[in-house]
Image (cartoon, rainbow, N blue to C red):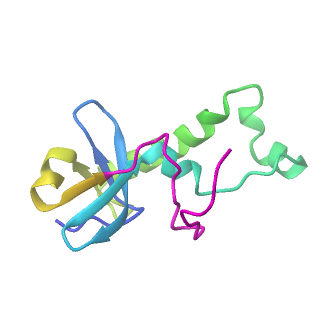
Amino acid sequence: MNVELYKDLIKDERGNYYVAVQKEGNELTLVNAMLERSYQEVWEFNEAFKKKYAEYEHQFIGKMIMDKLRHDVVFASKEDGHGRMYDLAAVTVDYKLIFIDMIEFYRNPRVGLNHDNNIH
């Protein structure tokens, strides 16, 4: 099994989805996929944003992120090159898993943050 960072999804028995954000040897670091997806795009609430996301007006901001994740789940389930879907139990056979807690500061490798950054 070769889990691809940021691309493949891993589903647990309760229906939670995770994405791998780091791989070193047989250690795989996972984070909740919705949390990771929320770090993919910076949104500026301006006129361009209002036009692009008009369908989401008067809805919860999390719906936009959940729709992105739902899209990724559908394509990963098809196994057509847009990522793969793995069962968490199967992944634990090949990898030692490390989980990033959702309420911890999340060091997002995409933007190069480090542990010295603080969130208040």
| Residue at 17 percent of width and 54 percent of height | 91
* Front position in the image: 30 or 75: 30
Direction right: furthest residue: 47
- Pick the residue in front: 63 or 81: 63
Quadrant location of residue 81?
bottom left
Q: Residue lying furthest left in this view?
A: 93
- Is 117 displayed left or right of 44 in the figure? left
Residue stretch in magenta: 99-120
Placement of the C terminus among the 4 image quadrants: top right
Q: How many marks?
A: 0
At x 83% / y 45%, what residue is drawn? 45
- Left/right of residue 8 with respect to residue 112 in the rendered view: left
Relative height, residue 111 to residue 11 (above, below): below
Q: What residue is rendered at 30% in x and 57% in y?
A: 84
Residue 79 screen position, x and y as percent: 29, 57
Q: Quadrant of residue 21?
A: bottom left
Query: Which one is in front, 15 or 95?
Result: 95
Query: Considering the image in quadrants, where does the N terminus appear?
Result: bottom left
Residue most toward the bottom? Answer: 25
Left or right: 118 as drawn, with respect to 115 = right
> Which residue corresponds to the image point at 52% horizontal and 59% vertical from the top-left?
107
Vertical placement of residue 104 versus 4, above or below: above
